[in-house]
Image: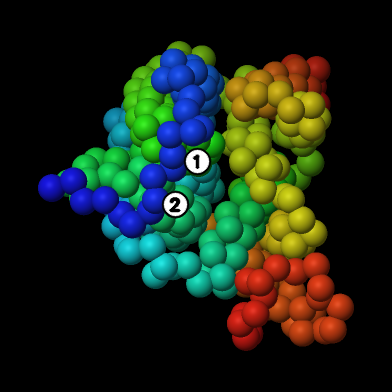
């Protein structure tokens, strides 16, 4: 039930902001500070999420095979590979390190 | 009925063949649409049911928010805290919508339907087009191909996760952070973005052991206003010549 509450809240919220962008008259959100904040907010969230999902085990921080996978993804990103390859690199390297007992 | 916004037509000079637009749009739609597989697997591996995973892709349809939500739920977060993190990630779509509504000039009745497709990829393809016609084709083709594939691959991924059992053994728990990293990397253009990312990482990891699940991410989001504030103070210093006119009245 809790999961459905989270799904419902996320679906409503995300749809509302998408629609708001299309309906709100241009200019209403065009203040420079608002624009800058909107551009930087995902940077902060994505950075924190990347780090947490790489190192978090419950509420503890650990270094395990995921770090190798995410590092591989970073290398592939620097090589400007497509999105799908980046994700594949992370998955394959993580699985490989685990298979070797890492 | 078709009410146009007051943007001048983008022009007949920069025409681009419809087939070229369709090809570009399909390239993005197919590549990213296929990664719904990673979402389906991650979602099922996080303990969501098949129906819940598919509902997320159908109704939320913005990848980063979906990954963030299932990650937060798997970590045992409160549902509303988890939804808040996913929601804040989705706020950027409002700003995409602002740009898109000027470029596409959609009739008002169509906007509630078009809204669900206002995401990173459709925006990138649409804004890269030289004319309104190609922008509309780009938006439509990217949106449709991505929506159909993303939902189909979510279903397959969630089914596949059940079949393969322990998703961690297959390294699939690394898919989520890799997706976030791939979305983040192109945003790290200037020292300001890098400072925000660095501070957010420190906050997100540092607070993880001491705050309830899901809350550290929300606190880490404060890195954005914090760095903006510090940057604003630095701009007051006399040597801010390289900064553009939007610096004028950020009085914080």
Q: Secondary structure at mark 1?
A: helix
The residue nearer to you, when weighing B217 against B27, is: B27
Residue B99's tag is: 2
Residue tagged 1? B127
The residue under the point 65% across, 80% down is: B248
Whole-angstrom CA distance, mark 2 to mark 1, is 8 Å
Name the side, left or right, on which B149 lies relative to A52.
left
In the rendered structure, are the residues bearing label 2 and label 1 in contact, judged by CB atoms less than 8 Å apart?
yes
Q: Give the position of the C terminus of chain B as an image quadrant.
A: bottom right
**First-in-chain label (2 vs 1):** 2
Is B190 above or below relative to A27?
above
The residue under the point 68% across, 42% down is: B186
Where does the image place residue A53, in percent across and percent down from the top left? 64, 44
Q: Residue furthest left?
A: B1
> What crowding class fits label 2: few (fewer than 14 Cα within 10 Å), some (14-19), or many (20 or more)?
some
Where does the image place residue B157, in percent across and percent down from the top left? 45, 21
Residue B140 visible to the viewer: yes
């Amino acid at each position: 039930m809790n999961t459905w509450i989270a799904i419902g809240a996320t679906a409503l919220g995300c749809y509302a902001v998408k629609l708001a962008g299309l309906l709100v008259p241009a200019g209403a959100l065009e203040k420079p500070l608002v624009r800058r904040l909107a551009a930087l907010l995902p940077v902060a969230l994505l950075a924190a999420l990347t780090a947490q999902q790489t190192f978090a085990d419950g509420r503890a921080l650990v270094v395990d095979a995921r770090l190798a996978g995410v590092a591989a993804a970073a290398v592939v990103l620097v090589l400007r590979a497509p999105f799908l390859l980046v994700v594949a690199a992370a998955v394959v390297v993580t699985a490989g390190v685990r298979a070797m007992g890492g | 009925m078709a009410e146009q916004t007051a943007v001048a037509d983008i022009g007949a000079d920069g025409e681009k063949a419809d087939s070229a637009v369709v090809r570009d749009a399909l390239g993005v739609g197919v590549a990213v649409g296929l990664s719904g597989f990673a979402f389906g697997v991650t979602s099922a591996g996080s303990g969501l049911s098949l129906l819940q995973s598919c509902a997320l892709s159908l109704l939320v349809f913005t990848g980063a928010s979906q990954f963030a939500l299932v990650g937060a739920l798997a970590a045992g977060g409160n549902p509303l805290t988890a939804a808040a993190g996913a929601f804040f990630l989705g706020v950027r779509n409002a700003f995409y919508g602002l740009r898109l509504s000027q470029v596409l000039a959609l009739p008002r009745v169509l906007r509630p339907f078009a809204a669900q497709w206002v995401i990173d990829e459709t925006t990138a393809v649409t804004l890269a087009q030289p004319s309104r016609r190609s922008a509309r084709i780009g938006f439509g083709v990217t949106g449709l191909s991505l929506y159909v594939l993303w939902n189909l691959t979510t279903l397959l991924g969630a089914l596949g996760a059940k079949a393969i059992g322990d998703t961690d053994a297959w390294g699939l728990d690394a898919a989520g952070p890799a997706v976030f990293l791939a979305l983040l990397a192109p945003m790290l253009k200037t020292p300001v973005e890098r400072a925000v990312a660095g501070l957010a990482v420190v906050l997100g990891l540092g607070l993880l052991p001491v705050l309830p699940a899901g809350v550290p991410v929300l606190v880490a989001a404060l890195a954005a206003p914090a760095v903006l504030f510090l940057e604003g103070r630095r701009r007051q210093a006399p040597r801010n010549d390289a900064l553009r006119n939007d610096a004028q009245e950020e009085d914080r």
